[in-house]
């Protein structure tokens, strides 16, 4: 066994000497190729060979080769500092994120061994600025300031970063630790004053940042919801309790919310039309029919009455629920509609014979932001005409469009449809700042959940069904922020 190991070392030593000769003679490309063919499990002098290869990459600016060599070595146990620093030098500030991530890993390993190395702190702070997490950058800039407060460039970067993050606490801490009247104290006070002035001016409209890294989100979706969303979009609405009559209409979130709150003893009434009426126009038309408005066409009235009969709904009961409810949770689903020859929108119930006839004799198109704003705003005004104290919580269904009729692939049409509705909702929010809020179920499912796993199909395999656990986490978030605190604790 000892003889075998000795032979390996001798053989490896000969190869390394050959590589050293190539490096000293300026044959850097050949030196690099010697590393790329090595097997670290068989070579006791592997890291020495890697160091020579990385130094050759620095000489020739062979960044791609440097990345390949560093990727094999950096994550190994016992990798020496010369390898880590060489990798960082080659990969620092490279535009590709994978290269920068490997540079970050190299620098983090160096910093763990020498926590006060100025070069490492400086370069790692810059790398955090490029690819995050920005929160860690702040810590390094503070440490650099403690080590060398006369470094004006670093001090400027620290103040600029804290001001951009609106980090009042860190600015105050910095002020308390420097000499009163000094240059840094004056600059820190200016930054602090600007942040405080901005906060007073904008209130809840302060800058809110996109999560910079997976670490900032935590380990699970439920925790990440609290990190990314704070209830600002529905803060103006009164919180609900078990005595609050609630009416839900639409698909997805509204239906799930109704089911869960109903099991907890809340006064929930749900319009069970779900995907049948999931456009703003369909919802306005239904409530127009409910209140006997004369604006609904004969054709659309017939569709509504046929659906009500099919679902065995009692008009007088629904009318009572609508006029007595305090909160309306309205979910809108899609913006694709069929229009007749005079460009009037038509109602249809998917899968019915009547729907086939209507589709054959009409033209599909994506309704506009302005149209959806008019229909959604009209729905709110109509309900408040008969129920003046009604509040509204609007949501956008995260469920994808089933079929595209507008000539685009379904994924493209779905993006256009959801974007149209989201802009329309925002216009409604601007017009009703005190009695209408928005619950971001769409953003939670489409943008946040993918950081933890697929949002669709985890419960039943369907790519149009949000996973049950995801829905449960979202509804739990809703109850934490929108239900009266004492009742939420006992629920």
Image: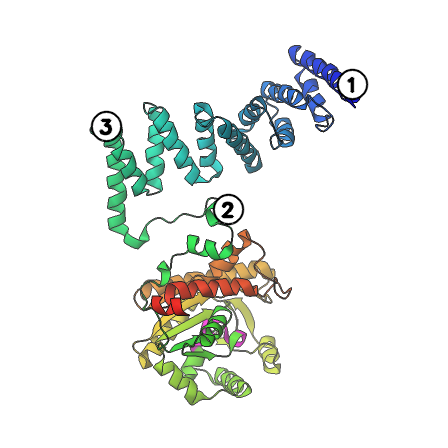
Report the quarter where the C terminus lies. Answer: bottom left
Residue drawn at the location 51% of the way across and 78% of the way down: 273
- Residue nearest the viewer, comparing 344 with 210: 210
27 vs 260: above or below: above
| Horizontal side, residue 27 vs residue 134: left or right | right
Mark 2 crowd level (few <14, some 14–19, many ≥20, 10 Å Cα): few
Range of residues picked out in magenta: 275-284
Residue 72 position within the rendered picture, expressed as x and y whole percent measured from the top left: 65, 31
- Circle 3 sits on which residue? 179
Mark 3 crowd level (few <14, some 14–19, many ≥20, 10 Å Cα): few
Residue 27 position within the rendered picture, expressed as x and y whole percent measured from the top left: 68, 14
Residue drawn at the location 39% of the way across and 36% of the way down: 138
Q: Going from the N terminus, do you reach mark 1 or mark 2 first?
A: 1
- Circle 1 sits on which residue? 7
| Horizontal side, residue 365 vs residue 483: left or right | right
Q: For marks 3 and 1, give the CA distance.
A: 64 Å
Residue drawn at the location 72% of the way across and 24% of the way down: 43
Residue 246 position within the rendered picture, expressed as x and y whole percent measured from the top left: 39, 76
> Does the magenta segment cover residue 121?
no
Q: Going from the N terminus, do you reach mark 3 or mark 1 first?
A: 1
Q: For marks 2 and 3, give the CA distance.
A: 38 Å
- Circle 2 sits on which residue? 214
Report the quarter where the N terminus lies. Answer: top right
Residue 411 position within the rendered picture, expressed as x and y whole percent measured from the top left: 58, 59
Q: For marks 1 and 2, give the CA distance.
A: 47 Å
326 vs 21: above or below: below
- The chief SS type of the magenta part is helix
């Amino acid at each position: 066994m000892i003889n075998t190991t000795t032979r390996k070392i001798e053989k490896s030593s000969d190869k390394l000497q050959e590589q050293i000769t190539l490096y000293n003679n300026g044959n850097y490309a050949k030196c690099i190729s010697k590393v790329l063919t090595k097997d670290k499990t068989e070579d006791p002098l592997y890291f020495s060979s890697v160091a020579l290869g990385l130094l050759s990459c620095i000489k020739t600016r062979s960044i791609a080769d440097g990345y390949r060599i560093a990727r094999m070595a950096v994550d190994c146990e016992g990798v020496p500092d010369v390898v880590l620093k060489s990798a960082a030098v080659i990969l620092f500030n490279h535009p590709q994120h994978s290269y920068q991530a490997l540079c970050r890993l190299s620098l983090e390993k160096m910093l763990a061994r020498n926590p006060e190395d100025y070069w490492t702190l400086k370069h790692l702070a810059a790398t955090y600025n490029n690819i995050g997490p920005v929160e860690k950058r702040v810590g390094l800039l503070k440490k650099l300031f403690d080590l060398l407060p006369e470094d004006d460039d670093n001090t400027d970067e620290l103040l600029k970063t804290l001001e951009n993050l609106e980090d009042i606490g860190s600015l105050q801490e910095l002020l308390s630790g420097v000499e009163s009247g000094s240059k840094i104290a004056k600059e820190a006070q200016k930054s602090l004053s600007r942040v405080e002035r901005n906060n007073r001016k904008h209130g809840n409209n302060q800058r809110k940042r996109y999560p910079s890294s997976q670490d900032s989100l935590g380990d699970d979706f439920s925790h990440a919801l609290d990190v990314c969303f704070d209830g600002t979009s529905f803060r103006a609405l009164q919180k609900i309790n078990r005595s609050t009559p609630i009416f839900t209409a639409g698909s997805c979130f509204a239906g799930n919310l109704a089911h869960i709150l109903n099991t907890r003893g809340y006064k929930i009434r749900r319009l069970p039309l779900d995907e049948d009426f999931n456009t703003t126009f369909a919802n306005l038309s239904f409530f127009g029919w409910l209140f006997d408005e004369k604006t609904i066409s004969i054709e659309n009235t017939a569709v509504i009455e046929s659906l009500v009969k099919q679902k065995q709904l009692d008009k007088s009961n629904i009318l009572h629920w609508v006029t007595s409810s305090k909160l309306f949770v309205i979910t809108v689903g899609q913006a694709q509609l069929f229009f007749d020859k005079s460009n009037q929108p038509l109602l249809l119930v998917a899968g019915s014979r009547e729907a086939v006839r209507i589709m054959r004799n009409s033209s599909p198109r994506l309704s506009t932001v302005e149209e959806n704003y008019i229909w959604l705003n009209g729905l709110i005004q109509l309900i408040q005409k008969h129920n003046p104290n009604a509040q509204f919580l609007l949501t956008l269904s995260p469920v994808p469009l089933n079929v595209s009729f507008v000539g685009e692939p379904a994924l493209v049409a779905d993006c256009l449809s959801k974007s149209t509705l989201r802009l329309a909702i925002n216009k409604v929010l601007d017009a009703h700042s005190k009695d209408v809020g928005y619950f971001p179920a769409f953003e939670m499912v489409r943008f946040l959940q993918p950081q933890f796993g697929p949002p669709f199909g985890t419960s039943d395999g369907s790519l149009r069904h949000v996973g049950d656990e995801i829905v449960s986490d979202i509804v739990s978030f809703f109850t934490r922020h929108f239900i009266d605190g004492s009742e939420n604790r006992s629920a």
